[in-house]
Image (spheres, rainbow, N blue to C red):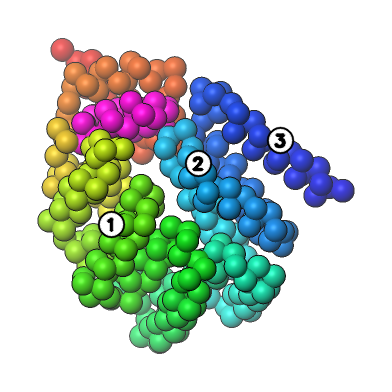
Amino acid sequence: MRLLHIWLSIFLGLVFVQHSNAANVSDLEESNLISYAAQQSFMDGDFAELDRISNIYRMEKSRTSSGLWKLTMFYCGIQQAIDAATEGGKAESKFHPLEKKIRKWMRQSPNSPSAHIAYGQALISHGWAYRGDGYADTVKPESWAPYKKYIAKARIELEQHKSVAASDPNWYVTMLTVSRAENWSYREFDALLNEALDKEPLFYQTYFSALQYLLPKWHGGLREVESFAQNAVKRTQQQEGSGMYARIYWYASQVQFSNEIFVKSLATWPQMRRGFDDIVRKYPDPWNLNHYAKFACLAKDKSKARQLLKQIEPIYLRDAWSPPQLRTHCMIWANRA
């Protein structure tokens, strides 16, 4: 009965999200609710619900108020469930029950793209638990073999079920993670990426997963990142304008360059500004506007920063500013004569 009450609350929350105005529910709240619902369904073993909601997100290509695909947030919830189930390290006793649970989902729903993708996610996480998040020279020698074993197993499983799972763009996102982990050649990586984007050119997470491969800390460099951002704009210009340029470097700032994006990368503010203009024209969400203001400050565009800082006063989001005192520093600087 308690679970029923929980699920009624979640269901009503989802209905509210789907029918509310963006001003009434923040993108962060909406995204967290979607992820939480997927996480709870997985933990409860409610595979039918996972298939139902992922099918809706996949078919409708529905987005949050900031423009992110709800399907992406669904898989974030699956990953959160995987992380919660295996918290504490690489112990086989943690991963084997999890993987067994997902195989049960696959048996119950052999035509479920999400079941096969979730299994790939779990196997990648299993391998990464051995490797750790540091650079290659920090990995213990004995950790490489199990890491490679589980990444290879993820690739094999995903490839074997491609005919079912690749109808979901997150199959390609997961395979792009494999390409980075297995040190694929650029030709192999690029072939996979182009196949993904030819099928669905507007799925943001495909670009973000590919960007990881192209970062200087992995297999690319600054020129590769810039070329990738420019090509992404060409592919999506009709629908997104220059928005993908801003989104790609926005993500790059999160995973490598931090607040030194205009110092340590080849990002140009004029094009990023045009990109943000296109983003907020289509998705005028507080999350996007707060980040636009932050990047205007980082780019030292005083007039734009002043305008945006004033605009976001009633919709300030602390989570968009890191470190939190950055907004205060920006306000002092932007209003200085």
| Amino acid type, label 3 | Leu
Q: Which residue is mark 1?
A: 211
Predominant SS of the magenta segment: helix
x and y percent of residue 303 in the render?
A: 19, 18
Q: Which residues are magenta?
A: 272-298
Q: Which residue is mark 2?
A: 62
Q: Residues within 10 Å of mark 3 (few under 14, many from 20)?
A: few
Quadrant in the picture for residue 181: bottom left
Residue at horizontal 58 percent and vertical 53 percent from the top: 55
| Front position in the image: 113 or 266 | 113
The vertical placement of 41 against 115, above or below, is above
| Amino acid type, label 1 | Leu
x and y percent of residue 38 in the render?
A: 62, 52
Count of numbered circles in the view? 3
Quarter occupied by the C terminus? top left
Q: Which residue is mark 3?
A: 12
Q: Nearer the viewer, mark 2 or mark 3?
A: 2
